[in-house]
Structure formats: structure tokens, C-alpha cells
Image (spheres, grey):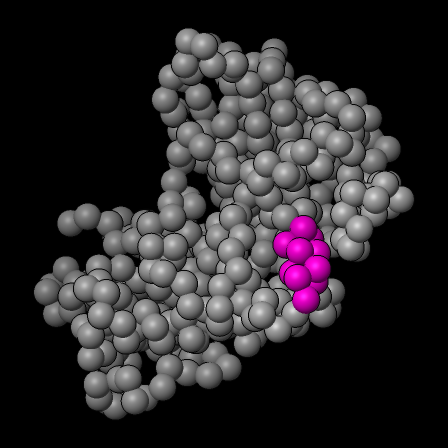
């Protein structure tokens, strides 16, 4: 049986997660979706779109979707659903897990890698984060959970942009990009997005593409004034985006730089890595900083192989894979993005540089 794709839906309170879910559960899209809802959500799925109110935890919808409210642990619910699907008792194509407004998606994502039984049944596709443009600034300033949700995202949907000035939305997008340059951002009207933008995003695939917002790289290079030796003077820099407030403001008149604790930075080099050294170094930093490392991913040039090495991790869990061969006319280089909470950029960049051949 092929693996069941799973999507984690997270986001700020009032950002439209429930609206999005209701659409997923009531639209005739021909996909049978099982939704796992954390019961202590701010508002549960309306009973009017449910076929029957039963004492059971799993309820069938009118369009063939299934809604399952978790009262116990997520692993139990996932195992239960997979077993019912195997036995033919339930028919569904994919799973969406809605986390509560302030949940940390990290442990939910880790479940798919740590639990063998779940890893054998499911494939984690992506983490989607909904951000409410009207209240984003306050929520990002006040709640680390909100900042974490941004750091974890594979795709960010920004709702309620119609309620704020364009400058405010631009400033928000700029801020989110510095927290997470990997995740594409899209303004949506109250959680109304096409399903093609929600499913099969392959955020956890070990693919040979490393999507970093190109403007973020431009910002970084503009701030450093150099490219490859990102480690040369990293030691006396705290955060590129906050180093030069004066000219940062000339560039983006309206962007206020927030020194958020969730930040990202990129390591780049044309020199190949020594695999053993890199493994030792990453093992060591994950030991120390793992809980604060949200997502990290790289496409790496390794000594001794003509293939790209694709690397990614969530918290303390990391894995790598051989990707396609480097093209004959392709410049072999390494790029790795780290997204985390107050990570010591200089230690990471210098350590990575010391692993080069």
C-alpha cells in the first residue's frame, strides 16, 4: 500500500485555519481527506457539515471526508486511521492535522520520523502556516509560538491582507522572509486557497532544490558585501538585517527591522565538504542546539561523489540522501539554510567552513 500523505496545518488564532478546513471538508474535490483536529481548537468544525453526530471519534462527512477529533495522542489516532484504511473500514487518500492556535508543529512533524509504525504508513508532505495580517505584528512580537510556526513552515498563507495597508503587508512579508526564506508566501482571502496550493508540496522531500527566497539572498549579500566567505567576519555580526538600520531604511522605506529570535542564515561555498568532518560537526551542533533548530536544509557539494548530497533536519532529527549528478556545466557549490531560535550564526558558519576540504 502506498504511503498516505500528511499535511500539518498550523497558524495564528483567527487566521482562517477553520475556514480552510471547512472548505477542504465540504468541497467536492474528489479527494477523500481525513482531518485530525486537536479538540481544544478555538472553534470546532460545524456540526452541520457532519453527516452524523455520533459518540464515535471518527465521523464521516457528506463528501466522503472523515473528521477525527483527538482526545488522546496523535500517534494513536494516526495508527488507528492507517489500520482502518488497511482493513478497508475507512477510505481516505490523505490526512490533514490541524494543530491548535499556539501549538509547536515540531513534535508533530517528528512523530512521522521517529515512530516506525507511522513512518511505514505515512509520508509527511508539508507544514502550512496561516498568518493573520491584521494581528501578525502583535502576535509575532508577543508569542514565540507564533514565530516558531513561521520558522517551521514550508508554505505561508497570509490572510486578512484586505484589512491592512499595503505597506503593512509588505513589511510583514519582509519580516517573515527573514525568519524563513525557504517558505513561499501567498496572500489569501480568509484561508481560501486552491487545494493545489495546499497538497503535494513535498516540503520534506529530499529533493535537489533548495528554495530560498532570492530576495533574502540579495539582502544578505547586500549586507555583507561579499558572497562565499560568509564566515569571514560573521563573528562580529549579530544579524545582517539589523546591522545597518540607516541604509536598511533607505532601501525599504517602510520596513521596520525586528530583531526576532527566529532567524535564518545561509552558508555558501564553492569548496567541497569533507563528509566525515561535516557529519561530526552537524552531530555536535544538533546535540547542543537541536531543540532551537527548527528547519535546516542543504544541497551540498561533497568530496568523493559526483552527485549532489541533499541534507535536511527538524530539531535533533536529520537525514541525508544522494541526489542527482552535478551537471557538466553546473558550478558545484554548497548552500545550506538554517532556521532557528537565537542560533549562534558565527559558530555555525565558522564550523561549516572548517569542514571544507
Front residue of this view, candidates 147 and 184: 184
Q: Image quadrant of residue 346?
A: top right
At x 38%, y 45%, the residue is 202
Residue 299, percent across and down? 50, 28
192 relative to 281 in the view: left or right: left
Residue 313, percent across and down? 50, 41
At x 59%, y 36%, the residue is 214
* Residue 320 in view: no
Q: Which residue is farthest left?
A: 88
At x 20%, y 74%, the residue is 63
Front residue of this view, candidates 45 and 116: 45
The span shown in magenta is 165-175
Q: Image quadrant of residue 181?
A: top right
Placement of the C terminus among the 4 image quadrants: top right
355 relative to 80 in the view: left or right: right
Is 187 covered by the magenta stretch?
no
Please, is residue 4 above or below residue 192 in the view? above
Residue 105, percent across and down? 51, 60
Q: Tell me which secondary structure the magenta stretch mostly adopts.
A: helix
Is 166 covered by the magenta stretch?
yes
Residue 300, percent across and down? 51, 23
At x 36%, y 61%, the residue is 194
Please, is residue 7 above or below residue 40 in the view? above
Front residue of this view, candidates 27 and 79: 27
* Residue 194 in view: yes
Total numbered badges shown on the rendered structure: 0
Amino acid at each position: 500500500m502506498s504511503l498516505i500523505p500528511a499535511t500539518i496545518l498550523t497558524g495564528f488564532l483567527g487566521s482562517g485555519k477553520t475556514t480552510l478546513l471547512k472548505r477542504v471538508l465540504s468541497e467536492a474535490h474528489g479527494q477523500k481527506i481525513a482531518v485530525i483536529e486537536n479538540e481544544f481548537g478555538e472553534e470546532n468544525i460545524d456540526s452541520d457539515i457532519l453527516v452524523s453526530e455520533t459518540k464515535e471519534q471518527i465521523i464521516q462527512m457528506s463528501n466522503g471526508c472523515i473528521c477525527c477529533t483527538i482526545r488522546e495522542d496523535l500517534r494513536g489516532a494516526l495508527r488507528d486511521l492507517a489500520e482502518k484504511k488497511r482493513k478497508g473500514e475507512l477510505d481516505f487518500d490523505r490526512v490533514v492535522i490541524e494543530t491548535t492556535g499556539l501549538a509547536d508543529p515540531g513534535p508533530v512533524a517528528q512523530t512521522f520520523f521517529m515512530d516506525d509504525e507511522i513512518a511505514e504508513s505515512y509520508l509527511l508532505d508539508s507544514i502550512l502556516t496561516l498568518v493573520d495580517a491584521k494581528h501578525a505584528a502583535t502576535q509575532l512580537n508577543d508569542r514565540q509560538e507564533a514565530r516558531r510556526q513561521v520558522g517551521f513552515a514550508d508554505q505561508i498563507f497570509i490572510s486578512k491582507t484586505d484589512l491592512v495597508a499595503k505597506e503593512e503587508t509588505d513589511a510583514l512579508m519582509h519580516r517573515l522572509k527573514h525568519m524563513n526564506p525557504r517558505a513561499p508566501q501567498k496572500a489569501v482571502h480568509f484561508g481560501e486557497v486552491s487545494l493545489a496550493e495546499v497538497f503535494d508540496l513535498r516540503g520534506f522531500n529530499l529533493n535537489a532544490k533548495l528554495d530560498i527566497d532570492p530576495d533574502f539572498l540579495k539582502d544578505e549579500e547586500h549586507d555583507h558585501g561579499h558572497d562565499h566567505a560568509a564566515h569571514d567576519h560573521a563573528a562580529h555580526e549579530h544579524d545582517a538585517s539589523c546591522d545597518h538600520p540607516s541604509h536598511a531604511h533607505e532601501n525599504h522605506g517602510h520596513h521596520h527591522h525586528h530583531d526576532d529570535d527566529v532567524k535564518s542564515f545561509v552558508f555558501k561555498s564553492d569548496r567541497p565538504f569533507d563528509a566525515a568532518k561535516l557529519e561530526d560537526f552537524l552531530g555536535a551542533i544538533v546535540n547542543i542546539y537541536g531543540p532551537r533548530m527548527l528547519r535546516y536544509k542543504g544541497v551540498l557539494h561533497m568530496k568523493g561523489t559526483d552527485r549532489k548530497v541533499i541534507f535536511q533536519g527538524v530539531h535533533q532529527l536529520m537525514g541525508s540522501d544522494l541526489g542527482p549528478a552535478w551537471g557538466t556545466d553546473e558550478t558545484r557549490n554548497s548552500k545550506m539554510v538554517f532556521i532557528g531560535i537565537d542560533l549562534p550564526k558565527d559558530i555555525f558558519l565558522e564550523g561549516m567552513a572548517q569542514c571544507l576540504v
